[in-house]
Amino acid sequence: MTPIVMLIGSNLFMTYAWYGHLKDLKGKAVFIAIVVSWGVAFFEYCLQVPANRIGFQYFSLTQLKVIQEIITMTVFAVFCVVYMKMPLKLDFLWAGLCLLAAAYFMFRGFTLPSYRINMRTAKIRITVLLLFVIGLVAVGYFGRGYLLKEITIHQLLNENKQLKEAITNLTAEEQIGYAKVIKQETQNGKVWTTLRFVETARDDKTKKILEKNYTIEGDVVHFDALIVKFDNKMVLDGRERAMYLWRRIYGETMAPQDGFAIELPGAEPARYADLMSRLSIKQKEMFWSNIWDLANNVEKLKQDGITAIYGNAVYSKLSPGLIYVFKISSTGQLYPEVVPDM
């Protein structure tokens, strides 16, 4: 039992020394990462050397190597999912099963000289098998969400040609909607503004695809949008594209989370209903739910070439007789243009 526990400990240090700098020191110079990793590896050797010396009393050199690789794969799987927050493909599980087969062949028919066989040896053998089983269970438990969801969305974003074609078909947009004041009145010393929000079609700015009325306290209104950007990984012609998703409207006396919803989070926005027509219903639901999740974590899909920024158009003292047109700048930012209501 002692060498197994020590090897697990040494692998924890080794795995962090090898890969921890990719997360914690990615902005530092390579020399600094080398020194830090070397310092961590010192503790790995403090455990690994005595573990192998003790283990060599019970196992052959090749058996020790197989045990080491099984522990390494198990520790790495947990490290990858829990610490690095990166998904594992099912191929990793198949590789683990191959290691299990390697352990079988390495230990098949294995017997130690009679003077070395004792209960301690039997316990160590059982521990090795239990360790591998526990490792598989841990990977399955901690990685279940990644295997069932994250890997699926990863494959959809990187391998679905129809989706890439749809995103490539996104055209540059100049206007994504407008708002105008319908009524503004004072009640009990407070100003109330009733406005009409209109979302326009991507290919025809005169076509209304969504129209809602809101009544908000005050004359300052925030129009909250999520701007989703696709880099050349997601676009067939290598030119960046962007989507603009309306989230909510709220006044200066309201917290953003208490605002009134424009589009339903997680649902397919009306402006892009025709864009994903070639995808299945399940694929569209998966795509849009993950795109909307960017509102909570703008870099959630960064490894797939998708990031997001918040667009917030703020207007002070909205007045009747004016139309507030939501425009897109040359840099992809949202800004208001005020024109008279004809």
Image (cartoon, rainbow, N blue to C red):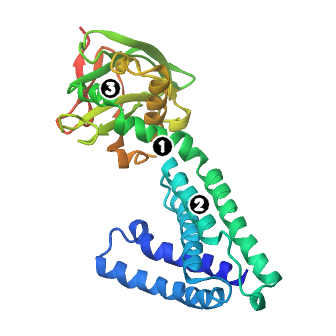
**Can residue 303 be spotted in the picture?**
yes
From the image, which quarter does the N terminus lie in? bottom right
Badge 3 crowding class, 10 Å Cα cut-off, few under 14, some 14 to 19, many 20 or more, is some
Q: Secondary structure at mark 1?
A: helix
Tag 1 near tag 3, CB within 8 Å = no
Against 277, residue 145 (above or below) is below
Residue position for label 2:
101
Q: Residue furthest right?
A: 119
Q: Nearer the viewer, mark 3 or mark 2?
A: 2
Identified by mark 2, the residue type is Ala
**Can residue 312 be spotted in the picture?**
no
Residue position for label 3:
162
Q: Quadrant of residue 239?
A: top left
Depth check, front residue: 50 or 10? 50
Disc number at residue 151?
1
The spot of residue 198 in percent (x, y) is 36, 15
Disc number at residue 296?
none
Q: Quadrant of residue 120?
A: bottom right
The spot of residue 47 in percent (x, y) is 59, 87
Identified by mark 1, the residue type is Ile
